[in-house]
Amino acid sequence: MAELKGRSLIASRCAKFFKDGDFVNLGIGLPLMCVNYLPEGVDLWLEAEIGTVGSGPSPSWDDADIDIIDAGGMPASVIAGGSVYDHTTGFGFIRGGHIDIAVLGTLQVDQEGNIANWTIPGKLVPGMGGAMDLCSGVKRIIVATDHCEKNGSSKILKKCTLPLTGQRCVTDIVTERCYFQVTPEGLLLKEVAPGYTVEDILAATEAKVIVPDSVEVMK
């Protein structure tokens, strides 16, 4: 198997957090790629705010059922035993504390576990969707994001400057360069992606980074 890079590596690493019995929500965009990297032998349920439990791999447009589309407007699938329901039920799962893990994309995330992913002041946006509910109602929030903006500035900050989606809710941050665990002392560097060094991560990260004696390779 070819070595995963970029967003494929992010999605693959995020999927490794999932374990037997988990009820998982995948946000729009990059997080939805996790459906293609689910760990073998792990029995879990993927919940989508569009109204499905039991989301499966992303089919090609040639094999798509036009009635099953994900939140990003791309073809989706539902596994055997999955179900379809209304928005009220979907948000009941979230607000009732029944979701174990949510994987969310972001505009910014900071060392305190704050996330800003729904708006940029002055720009027209469709709204926050279910992100605020997820941040307040889900046990574990994993941020899946590019490490830097296109201009090279870090998206991993000391303090978010954009309007917050959730406060002190993020537990883990996965980028194409590394995996951080959010702690009260700062971001603990757990893994570094192939092709990067600890020094590279420190140079590309505004937030406070704690470097342990041993840092693993991200796969």
Image (tube, rainbow, N blue to C red):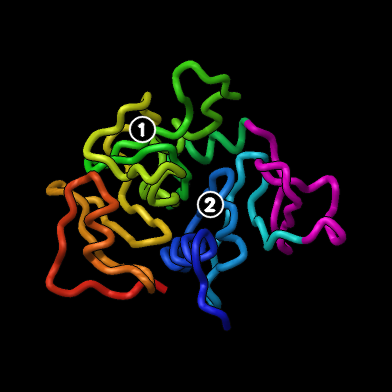
Q: Where 129 sits versus 185, above or below?
A: above
Give me the C-alpha separation between circle 1 and circle 2.
17 Å
Task: Judge from the rendering whether residue 69 lies leftward or rightward of residue 116; answer left or right.
Answer: right
Compared with residue 78, is residue 137 higher up or lower down, i.e. above or below? above
Decide which of 111, 137 is in the foreground and name it.
111
Magenta-highlighted residues:
60-87
Residue 119 bears which disc, if any?
A: none
Residue positioned 31% across, 50% down in the render: 171
Secondary structure under tag 2 reads helix
**Element type at mark 1:** loop
Q: Residue at x 47, y 50 (%)?
A: 103
Give the left or right position of residue 86, taking residue 64 as reference.
Answer: left
Query: Foreground residue, 150 or 47?
Result: 150
Q: How many marks?
A: 2
On the image, the x and y values in percent for residue 29 come to 58, 46
80 in magenta: yes
Along the line of sight, which residue is nearer the eye, 6 or 136? 6
Q: Position of residue 27 (x, y in %)?
A: 54, 45
- 84 left or right of 162? right
Q: Name the residue carrying label 2.
A: 31
Q: Splitting the image into 4 quarters, where does residue 170 fall?
A: top left
Which quadrant is the C terminus positioned in? Answer: bottom left
Q: Earlier in the sequence, mark 1 or mark 2?
A: 2
Picture residue at 51% right of the left edge, 53% below the top: 24
Instruction: Inspect the image, locate mark 2, and give the three-letter code of the amino acid beneath it.
Output: Pro
Residue 50 is situated, as x and y percent measured from the top left of the image, at 66, 39
Taking the image as drawn, is residue 56 in sight?
Answer: yes
Q: Residue at x 47, y 61 (%)?
A: 10
Judging by the rendered image, the residue that carries numbered circle 1 is 166
Question: Magenta stretch: residue 212 in it?
Answer: no
